[in-house]
């Protein structure tokens, strides 16, 4: 795993799951973050192969799209969707 700029750990599995959960293609995420499709594939295979600022950018884009990254809870780290407010 790699540390992002905010000191949060993000795994390749979380990145893959988060992207799939909100229905984005690797090309979509690449476009959103200014990275290449190849970089997205690399991050989703082994997050340690990409720069920490890239992991942070991917995570930030996914969070902005409604994903919540969950820390280790005994079952491993995961992802979820933000609850929609009724405001």
Image (cartoon, grey):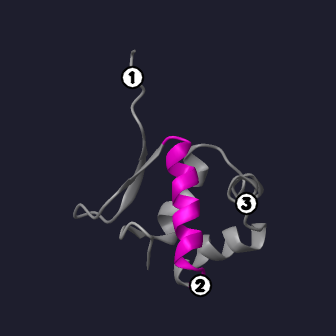
The extreme top residue here reads 87
Q: Are marks 3 and 1 in contact (CB under 8 Å)?
A: no
The overriding secondary structure of the stretch rendered in magenta is helix
Q: Position of residue 28 (x, y in %)?
A: 74, 52
Question: Distance of mark 1 from mark 2, alpha carbons?
Answer: 37 Å
Residue for badge 3:
30
Label 2's element?
Answer: helix
**Residue 63, position as x, y percentages in the image:** 49, 48
Check residue 5 for magenta coloring. no
Q: Which residue is mark 2?
A: 49
On the rendered image, what quadrant is the N terminus found in? bottom left
Circle 3 crowding by C-alpha within 10 Å: few under 14, some 14–19, many from 20: some
Q: Specify the label residue 85 is tagged with.
A: 1
- Near-viewer residue (73 or 8): 8
- Tell me the crowding category of disc 1: few under 14, some 14 to 19, or many 20 or more residues within 10 angstroms, Cα based: few
The quarter of the displayed image where residue 26 is located: bottom right
Question: Could you tell me residue 79's position as x and y percent?
Answer: 42, 52
Asked if residue 83 is positioned above or below residue 59 in the image, the reply reads: above
Indicate which disc, 3 or 1, sits on the residue closer to the N terminus. 3
Which quarter of the rendering shows the C terminus? top left
Q: Is disc 1 placed on a helix, strand or loop? A: loop
Name which residue lies at 73% across and 60% down.
30
Query: Rounded to the nearest whole Å, what is the CA distance between mark 2 and mark 3?
Result: 16 Å
Lateral position of residue 39 relative to residue 64, left or right: right
Q: Quadrant of residue 77?
A: bottom left
Do the residues bearing badges 1 and 2 touch, measured as CB atoms within 8 Å?
Answer: no
Give the side of residue 60 with respect to residue 29, left or right: left
Residue 61 numbered mark, or none:
none
Q: Which residue: 76% across, 73% down?
A: 38
Specify start and end residues of the magenta stretch as a single range.
Answer: 49-66
């Amino acid at each position: 795993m790699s540390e992002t700029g905010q000191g949060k750990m993000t795994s390749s599995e979380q990145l893959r799951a988060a992207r799939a959960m909100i229905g984005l293609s690797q090309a979509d995420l690449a476009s959103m973050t200014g990275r290449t499709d190849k970089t997205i594939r690399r991050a989703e295979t082994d997050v340690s192969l990409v720069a920490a600022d890239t992991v942070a950018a991917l995570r930030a884009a996914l969070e902005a799209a409604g994903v919540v990254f969950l820390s280790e809870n005994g079952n491993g780290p995961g992802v979820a969707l933000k609850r929609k407010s009724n405001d």
